[in-house]
Amino acid sequence: MERRIEKFFSNGLTLEYSIIGEGEPIFVMHGGHSNCREEFGYKALLENGFSIITPSRAGYGDTSKEIGKSLSAACDYYMKLLNHLNIKKVHLLAISAGGPSGIYFASKYPELVCSLILQSAVTKEWLTTKDKELKAAKVLFRPKTEKYTWKLISIMNNLFPQFIFNQMFPSFSKLSQDQAKEMLGKEDVEEIRKMNNRQRSGDGFFIDLAQINELTIENLQDISCPTLIMHSKHDGSVPLEHPYLAHKKIPTSELCLLDTWGHLIWLGKSSKETDELLIRFLKFHNT
């Protein structure tokens, strides 16, 4: 997977991005704790002749945190990046905490978006002050300490991959590990290990938590392109209220509930079906 990593500069700010492959372009809004080096789901897209452009969203990687002063400002920079690359239209793929960015972009720049795919995506208020997950995240992933958190996770994961997989499992799936046993492949533990070695939060995760509150029902209703909503029935990270809301409010949407083991729909024995559904949708709605 040959990946070019570039930087786009505008108004004194930096937007880092990567490009892989050649062909019909897919613009990826990666999930939380990720960046332009994301890998999940890319292999099938490349094998089917697509190119993938992935900006490190605001505050992630080497992208300036100031780009994320608002969801509107961030999406304006993503639009400028496409103009810089002379790309007229893209398939927009929004993943997990990248959901608000994808939804807002598709609603505000319909002329640039051929189709929208929401994968395990956040589509409304997510973690609140009542959630213990938010309280833990504000300690573990705040900008001044997140690099130490991820370094420790990485070290432990490299030493004890199965143990860390077991510890993280409940954050991804509502199933018990016994229930999910038949859904998981031997390679999934290794994929989680590699994921934890490339994860960083930077300022991005806190920006995500703020930007989610800027998303409105009107943004969902304003989306006019064909939209595929892909979500696991057993997602332990982003509840099913999110895909149901998106399907209800996006007029052109199709909801596909997957019988996968959890949030990371690109892993597990059913990941091939996930890829096939996505490729079929993209080829039907080509640019």
Image: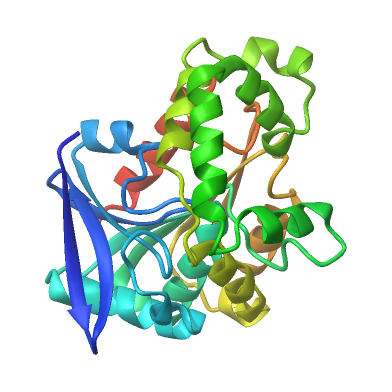
Residue beneath the point at 68% across and 22% down? 166
- In the image, 149: left or right of 187? right
**Nearer to me, 175 or 117:** 175
For the C terminus, which image quadrant? Answer: bottom left
Choose between 282 and 80: the one closer to the eye. 80
Tell me where residue 231 sits by quadrant: top right
In the image, residue 173 lies at what x, y percent?
A: 71, 33
- Residue lying at 43% horizontally and 54% vertically, measured from the top left: 30
The percent coordinates of residue 58 (x first, y second) are 42, 70
Query: Which colour assignment does the render follow?
Result: rainbow
Q: Along the line of sight, which residue is nearer the eye, 157 or 223?
A: 157
The answer to whether 170 appears left or right of 252 in the picture is: right
Q: Is residue 186 above or below residue 6?
A: above
Q: Quadrant of residue 243?
A: bottom right
Vertical side of 100 occupied by 178: above or below: above
Give me the residue at 28% from left, 62% from top. 90
In percent of the image, x 33 and y 53: which residue is there?
285
Q: Position of residue 234 (x, y in %)?
A: 72, 34
Give the total number of marks visible in the rendering: 0
Quadrant position of the N terminus in the picture: top left
Whether residue 251 is visible, yes or no, is no
Residue 213 visible here: yes
Which residue, as the protein is rendered here, is positioned at the far bottom? 11
Residue 259 coordinates in the image, percent (x, y): 65, 28
